[in-house]
Image (spheres, rainbow, N blue to C red):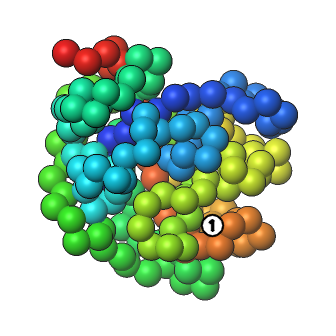
Amino acid sequence: MTPAGYMAKRVQTPAGFHADGVLDVYSVSSHVNDDFADYIQYWKHNGYWLFDSPEIIRALAQDNHIQLEGTLLFYYEVYENEFDGKAWLPYQPEAFLTNVRPPSEKTLRGFDVVTFFARSSPECSPLSCNGMAGEIRTNEHCLLVSFEEAYEKISAGAFNQAEPGPYRIFAVYSVPWDGRLP
């Protein structure tokens, strides 16, 4: 797994979302739990379309009067190969400077499967976006418990009827954060 970056998110469980045992959604995509801002327009993200450090998120929020209160901070690592529907193939981050500083403290929450049809930012997390957590057992954060489980389910075609791929596997970590500007 490769360090991919950070994102501050507003975590929620949408009305009408039903999956046994799911308390909240920690998906990488922003379809169910919103990113702290429509951040791409500021061009401070790295080649994985995330942020190299929490400080960059704080600075962007402060400079643009974006509220961080109520957000949770996540750190992601990504598998170096993506599944195109037939095979696992290597891919590279976009050609933006990427220098992720891994956190000194992190808690693994699970593994998300994320689509990258447009080949840029994270698009859809089928477990939450397509409600596949109703068919595939997940943990309380709507994530798969292990990398091996994610790899096996993708390889076996469990996500083929969701959003179009390719599919990438992300490890999702929570990181201590007070959600306030300095």
Image coordinates of residue 123 in percent, x first then y, are 54, 59
Residue 111 seen in the current view: no
Q: What amino acid type should be assigned to the residue bearing mark 1?
A: Ile
Of residues 181 and 99, the one nearer the viewer is: 181
Q: Residue at x 69, y 29 (%)?
A: 13
Res 114 → quadrant: bottom right
Residue at 19%, 58% in the rendered image? 98
Left or right of residue 53: residue 129: right
Residue 163, placed above or below residue 9: below
Q: Quadrant of residue 96?
A: bottom left
Residue pictured at 55% horizontal, 73% vertical: 117
Relative vertical location of residue 155 with respect to residue 20 in this rendering, above or below: below
Q: Is residue 17 above or below residue 134?
A: above
Q: Secondary structure at mark 1?
A: helix
Q: Residue 42, percent across and down?
A: 28, 50
Looking at the picture, how far across and down is residue 34, in whole percent?
54, 38
Name the residue that disc number 1 marks: 154
**The N terminus is located in which quarter?**
bottom left
Q: Is residue 75 left or right of residue 23?
A: left
* The one of 97 and 174 positioned closer to us in this rendering: 97
